[in-house]
Amino acid sequence: NAGVMQNPRHLVRRRGQEARLRCSPMKGHSHVYWYRQLPEEGLKFMVYLQKENIIDESGMPKERFSAEFPKEGPSILRIQQVVRGDSAAYFCASSPRDIDYEQYFGPGTRLTVT
Amino acid sequence: QKEVEQNSGPLSVPEGAIASLNCTYSDRGSQSFFWYRQYSGKSPELIMSIYSNGDKEDGRFTAQLNKASQYVSLLIRDSQPSDSATYLCAVTGSQGNLIFGKGTKLSVKP
């Protein structure tokens, strides 16, 4: 049973470009969470999605960031007009149920903005 | 604002000893608690979940929960150098997202 998959694993973007990060949850999991880990800082929640629905985006910056989880295909975290402060590791986690259940993390995408 | 606090360490223990990692949380209504292990440059790996007061054992790992004191701990028995990592304590937020502490760095010396 494949785990959570994320791609790309490493992404380099110049300031002002767009970054698209993809996440395929574990088989049977319909709940997807995105987290960001800045260098030397803790993991911070960004957004929680189910198929075709954003459930909670309270942790996501209001501008330049968006997320989706379409009916078919992976969840996508999109960052427009990237800035150096966006450089971080972005992790996706999935769960078969909602509140209070275990979440399993993908390998992450390490974004570097030059 | 819900918070999770951990001692950042580093916590250094000799091989074969018991490592004790501690965590406190601010929201008395929290119901679910998790310990993740994160090796440098890698993603968090779930090692324990605990939902009820008391102890939960899994191999060399024991999680302890005391909701009255808002305290969660992780004991690692017979510590091995391969246990050297950062251990993250997490509790669930109101919508199911995880709220993480900053982690405790554990170093097990051979």
Image: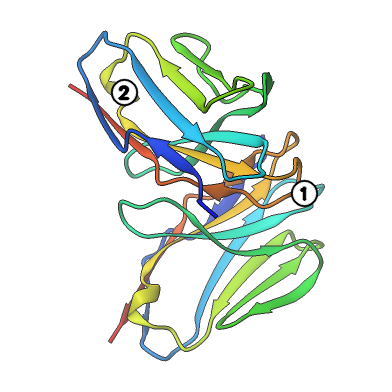
The quarter of the image holding the N terminus of chain B is top right
> Percent from the top left, x then y, of residue A32?
61, 35
Q: Which of the numbered marks, if any, corresponds to residue B30?
A: 1
Q: Tell me, what colour scheme is on the image?
A: rainbow
Helix, strand or loop for disc 2? helix
Q: Amino acid at mark 2?
A: Gly
Q: Which of the numbered marks, if any, corresponds to residue A85?
A: 2
Q: Which of the numbered marks, if any, corresponds to residue A68?
A: none
Q: Amino acid at mark 1?
A: Ser
Q: For the residue carrying disc 2, how many other residues have a C-alpha within 10 Å: few (<14), some (14-19), or many (20+)?
A: few
> Percent from the top left, x then y, of residue A72?
59, 23
Q: What residue lies at 69% left-to-right and 72% top-to-bottom? A: B64
- A64 and B10: which is toward the camera: A64
Q: What residue lies at 54% left-to-right and 25% top-to-bottom? A: A73
- B84 and B22: which is toward the camera: B84
Camera sees residue A37: no
The quarter of the image holding the C terminus of chain B is bottom left
Q: What residue lies at 31% left-to-right and 14% top-to-bottom? A: A82
The span from disc 2 to disc 1 (Cα, nearest Å) is 32 Å
Q: Along the horizontal axis of the image, is B62 left or right of A65?
A: right
> Percent from the top left, x then y, of residue B49?
67, 62
